[in-house]
C-alpha cells in the first residue's frame, strides 16, 4: 500500500498552483471585484489553455480519463487561491455528469464545446438550492419534475441571488419555457446525479482544505510582522496555540480528503461516508481557520482591507454547498450504524465485501 | 490469548508478571516486535505491515504491552543510534519480555522544560557514576531497566552536555518510590540515584548527544508507535455498540458525539497510514508528530466522555459494584485518557513545537 501522490499528480497540482500564483493573487481578486465583471478573462483563458476541462471525463468521451486523486490537489489549490472562476464545478462535477448522460447529437456537441474550453456547463442539482455560475455557462443541466434537461443558457430566465461571497454567482431559474433537451429520466439519471453529488462534495471539501491552510498562512505572515509589547505577536503562546490548534484540524482533515478522493469511484456506502467525513472535517477546519485568522489580525482582521474575509466567505458558502452538515452526517450514520466498522474496515468497499 | 483479562500491570507485581509472561508468549512466535530484524526476535516487517499486525492485535482484545517504553520508544532509537554490540545486548531481551523498560527523563524541576535536568553522570574510567532524582517514570515500580537523561558535562547548560544512559532499577544505589496515580494504581514512580555505577557501554550514542537522541525518541513516541490507530478504532467500535444498546435513553447530541468519535478514529488511522507510506519511502517524521499527539489524546478523552454520558448515573460505579456490568472498563479508560494531554510532552508544549517548527512562528 502506498498512500502518496504520484509524481504526475503532484506536477499537475504544481502547474495549477503556479498559474494561480501568477493570476490569482488578492490584488487580482480585488480588481475583478471592482470591475464588476463575471470573470477575469485573461485568467480564465490561461486556465482553459491548461486543458483541464475534461480531466474527469472518460477518454472515450473525449476527456483525459483522470480520477479523484488526480484532481483533488487541483481543487485544493483553487481553494487556497480563492479562485472565482468555476474550474472545480465545471471540470470536477458538470462535465463528468454531462458525459455520463450525453447520448443525442445536441448533448454531445455541447460536451465537445465544453471539453474544448469554449463554454462551461452549470448544474442545477437537487442538492443545491441555486445554480452557480449560470450566467457565464453555455448550457445548464437541470432537474425538473421527473426529468433531467440540458438547457441552452441564453433561453433560460435567471434570477440573481447575491451572495456574501463577492465572487460567487448564484442564480435561481425562473419557471418559464426554454430550449431544452430531455437527456434522461431522473430514475435513470439517479446514479449519475449521486456521483455528481459525491464529486461536488469531495471537491468542495478539497477547496475548504485549501482555504483553511490559506487562512493559517495569512495569519502566520501577519503574526510574524505585527509587533506589540516590543515583540512579534507570533512569539506569544496565546497566538501560537490558536494557530497550532487550527493546524491540527487541518492535518487530520487532509488524509480524509485524500482517501475520499482515492475511493471516489466506488460509489458505495463506504466511499460516500468518507466523502461526507471529508466535507464535515474540512468545513470545521476552514471555519475555525478563518475565524482564528481574523482574531490573530485583531481589528485589522475585521476590516475590508485585509484579505481574510474573502476566504471566510468562501468557506461559509462551501460548508453547505453540495450538502449541508446534517445531510452529510446522515450518510456517515448510515455507514457507522449499518455497516461493519473497526480497524479491519478502514478501506472497506461494497465490492470487496460482496 | 489469555483465557481471562490479565490484572493491571500497574496495580501489582502479579499483574506485571502476568503481562511479562504474555510478552514471552508473543516472543515465542516472534510476534514481540514484528518490525525488528529476525536477529533480534522480529520478523523484518515494514511499517504498514506493523499497522496491520496492530489491527489484528487490538481486534483480538489482546493485553496492553507492559514493555511499550522498551519496544516502541527505546527500541527504534537503539536501532538508529546503538552500536551492534548494544543492539545485540539489549534488543532481543527487550523483544522477549525478559527485560522490561521504564523511561527516566523528567525531574522535579524538569518537566515541560526537560532541558533543565540536573541528574549527573560523572565519567570514572569505564564507568559512569549516576546521581539525581527522576520522577513520573511509568512502569518503574516493577520494571527491570530504565533509560535516563543525565548531565555528563558538569559545566554544560540546557540541551548541551546531556547523555542517554541505561541503568538497572535494582542496582545498588537505586531507590524506587511508587507514586499513587489519580486512579489509585502505582503506574509511575520516583527514582532516587545515589552513586549508581554503570558501564560506559550503557550510554546510547555519543557523550553529549543525549538531547537529540531523546528528541528522536519523542518523535517515535508522539508520531507513530505509542498509539497505533487500531486502539482507537476498536474503542470507537465499542462505543458505537454501547450507544446502540442504550440508543433510546440517550440525548440527541450523544449520537453526533458517537459519530464524531468514529470519524476521529478513522481520520487518525488514515493519517498514520499516510505517514507510514512517507516514512517507508525514506521520509522522516518531523514536527507533525506533535499534531498526532494532540489529536489522539483529545480524541481519547472525548470518546470516553461520550461513553460515560451514555452510561449515565451508572458511570461512577467501580468494577467491583454488583451493577457495574462493563462500566468499569470505560471508567478506567476515561481516567487513563486524562493523562494523554500530559505525558510524552504536554499538549501545550506540542502546540509550541507546531507553531515554531511547522508554521515558522518566532520563539
Image (cartoon, coloured by chain):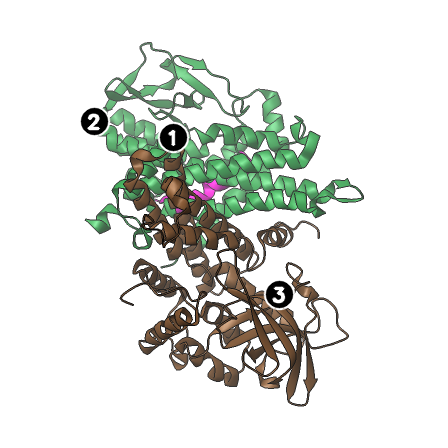
Chain colours: A green, B brown
Q: Is B217 situated above or below B253? A: below
Q: Position of residue A77 (x, y in %)?
A: 51, 41
* Residue B361 disc label: none
Residue annotated with mark 2: A187
Classify 10 Å Cα crowding around label 1: few (below 14), some (14-19), many (20 and above).
Answer: few
Q: Nearer the viewer, mark 3 or mark 1?
A: 3
Which image quadrant: the N terminus of chain B? bottom left
Q: Evaluate whether residue A96 shows in this view.
A: no
Report, in whole angstroms, how far the alpha carbon at label 1 lies from the one at label 2: 24 Å
Residue annotated with mark 3: B106
Q: Give the extent of the magenta segment.
A: A66-82
* Residue at the left extreme, as displayed: A354
Identify the residue at image location x=69%, y=30%.
A300
Identify the residue at image location x=22%, y=48%.
A351
Q: Position of residue A124 (x, y in %)?
A: 35, 23
Residue annotated with mark 1: A326
Q: Label 1's element?
A: helix
Using the rendered view, name the quadrant where residue B247 is placed. top left
Q: Chain of mark 3?
A: B
Amino acid at each position: 500500500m502506498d498512500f502518496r501522490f504520484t509524481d504526475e499528480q503532484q506536477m499537475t497540482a504544481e502547474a495549477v498552483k503556479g498559474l494561480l500564483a501568477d493570476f490569482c493573487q488578492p490584488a487580482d481578486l480585488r480588481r475583478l471585484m471592482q470591475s464588476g465583471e463575471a470573470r477575469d478573462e485573461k485568467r480564465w483563458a490561461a486556465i482553459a489553455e491548461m486543458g483541464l476541462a475534461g480531466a474527469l471525463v472518460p477518454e472515450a468521451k473525449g476527456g483525459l480519463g483522470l480520477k479523484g486523486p488526480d484532481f483533488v490537489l487541483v481543487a485544493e489549490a483553487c481553494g487556497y487561491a480563492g479562485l472565482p472562476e468555476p474550474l472545480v464545478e465545471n471540470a470536477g462535477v458538470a462535465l463528468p455528469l454531462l458525459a455520463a448522460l450525453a447520448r443525442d447529437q445536441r448533448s454531445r456537441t455541447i460536451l465537445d464545446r465544453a471539453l474544448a474550453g469554449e463554454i462551461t456547463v452549470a448544474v442545477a442539482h437537487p442538492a443545491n438550492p441555486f445554480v452557480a455560475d449560470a450566467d457565464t455557462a453555455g448550457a445548464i443541466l437541470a432537474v425538473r419534475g421527473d426529468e433531467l434537461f440540458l438547457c441552452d443558457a441564453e433561453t433560460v430566465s435567471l434570477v440573481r441571488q447575491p451572495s456574501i461571497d463577492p465572487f460567487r454567482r448564484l442564480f435561481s431559474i425562473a419557471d418559464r419555457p426554454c430550449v431544452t433537451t430531455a437527456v434522461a429520466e431522473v430514475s435513470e439519471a439517479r446514479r449519475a446525479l449521486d456521483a455528481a453529488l459525491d464529486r461536488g462534495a469531495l471537491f468542495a471539501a478539497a477547496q475548504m482544505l485549501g482555504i483553511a491552510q490559506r487562512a493559517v498562512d495569512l495569519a502566520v505572515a501577519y503574526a510574524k510582522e505585527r509587533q506589540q509589547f516590543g515583540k512579534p505577536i507570533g512569539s506569544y503562546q496565546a497566538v501560537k496555540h490558536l494557530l497550532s490548534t487550527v493546524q491540527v484540524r487541518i492535518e487530520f482533515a487532509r488524509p480524509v480528503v485524500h482517501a475520499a478522493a482515492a475511493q471516489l469511484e466506488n460509489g458505495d456506502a463506504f466511499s460516500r461516508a468518507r466523502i461526507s467525513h471529508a466535507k464535515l472535517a474540512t468545513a470545521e477546519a476552514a471555519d475555525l481557520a478563518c475565524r482564528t485568522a481574523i482574531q490573530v489580525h485583531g481589528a485589522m482582521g475585521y476590516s475590508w482591507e485585509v484579505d481574510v474575509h474573502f476566504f471566510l466567505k468562501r468557506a461559509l458558502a462551501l460548508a453547505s454547498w453540495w450538502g449541508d452538515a446534517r445531510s452529510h452526517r446522515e450518510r456517515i450514520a448510515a455507514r457507522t450504524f449499518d455497516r461493519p466498522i473497526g480497524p479491519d474496515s478502514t478501506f472497506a468497499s461494497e465490492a470487496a465485501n460482496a | 490469548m489469555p483465557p481471562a483479562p490479565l490484572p493491571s500491570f500497574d496495580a501489582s507485581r502479579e499483574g506485571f508478571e502476568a503481562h511479562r509472561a504474555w510478552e514471552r508468549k508473543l516472543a515465542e512466535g516472534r510476534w514481540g516486535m514484528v518490525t525488528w530484524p529476525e536477529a533480534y526476535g522480529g520478523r523484518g516487517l515494514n511499517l504498514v505491515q506493523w499497522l496491520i499486525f496492530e489491527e489484528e492485535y487490538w481486534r483480538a482484545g489482546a493485553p496492553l504491552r507492559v514493555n511499550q517504553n522498551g519496544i516502541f520508544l527505546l527500541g527504534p532509537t537503539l536501532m538508529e543510534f546503538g552500536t551492534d554490540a548494544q543492539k545485540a545486548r539489549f534488543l532481543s531481551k527487550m523483544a522477549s519480555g525478559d527485560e522490561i523498560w521504564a523511561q527516566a527523563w523528567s525531574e522535579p524541576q524538569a518537566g515541560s522544560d526537560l532541558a533543565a535536568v540536573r541528574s549527573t553522570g560523572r565519567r570514572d574510567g569505564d564507568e559512569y557514576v549516576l546521581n539525581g532524582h527522576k520522577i513520573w517514570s511509568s512502569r518503574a515500580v516493577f520494571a527491570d531497566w530504565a533509560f535516563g537523561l543525565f548531565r555528563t558535562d558538569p559545566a554544560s547548560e540546557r540541551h548541551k552536555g546531556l547523555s542517554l544512559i541505561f541503568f538497572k532499577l535494582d542496582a545498588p544505589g537505586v531507590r524506587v518510590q511508587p507514586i499513587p496515580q489519580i486512579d489509585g494504581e502505582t503506574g509511575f514512580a520516583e527514582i532516587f540515584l545515589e552513586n549508581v555505577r554503570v558501564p560506559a557501554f550503557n550510554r546510547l550514542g555519543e557523550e553529549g548527544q543525549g538531547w537529540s537522541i531523546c528528541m528522536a525518541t519523542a518523535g517515535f513516541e508522539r508520531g507513530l508507535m505509542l498509539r497505533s490507530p487500531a486502539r482507537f478504532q476498536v474503542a470507537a467500535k465499542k462505543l458505537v455498540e454501547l450507544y446502540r444498546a442504550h440508543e433510546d435513553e440517550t440525548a440527541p447530541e450523544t449520537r453526533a458525539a458517537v459519530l464524531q468519535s468514529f470519524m476521529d478514529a478513522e481520520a487518525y488511522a488514515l493519517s498514520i497510514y499516510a505517514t507510514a507510506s512517507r516514512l517507508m519511502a525514506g521520509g522522516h517524521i518531523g514536527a507533525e508528530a506533535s499534531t498526532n499527539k494532540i489529536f489522539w489524546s483529545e480524541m481519547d478523552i472525548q470518546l470516553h466522555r461520550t461513553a460515560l454520558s451514555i452510561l449515565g448515573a451508572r458511570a461512577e460505579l467501580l468494577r467491583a459494584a454488583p451493577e457495574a456490568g462493563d462500566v468499569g472498563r470505560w471508567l478506567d479508560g476515561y481516567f487513563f485518557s486524562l493523562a494523554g494531554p500530559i505525558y510524552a510532552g504536554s499538549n501545550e508544549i506540542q502546540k509550541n513545537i507546531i507553531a515554531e517548527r511547522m508554521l515558522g512562528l518566532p520563539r
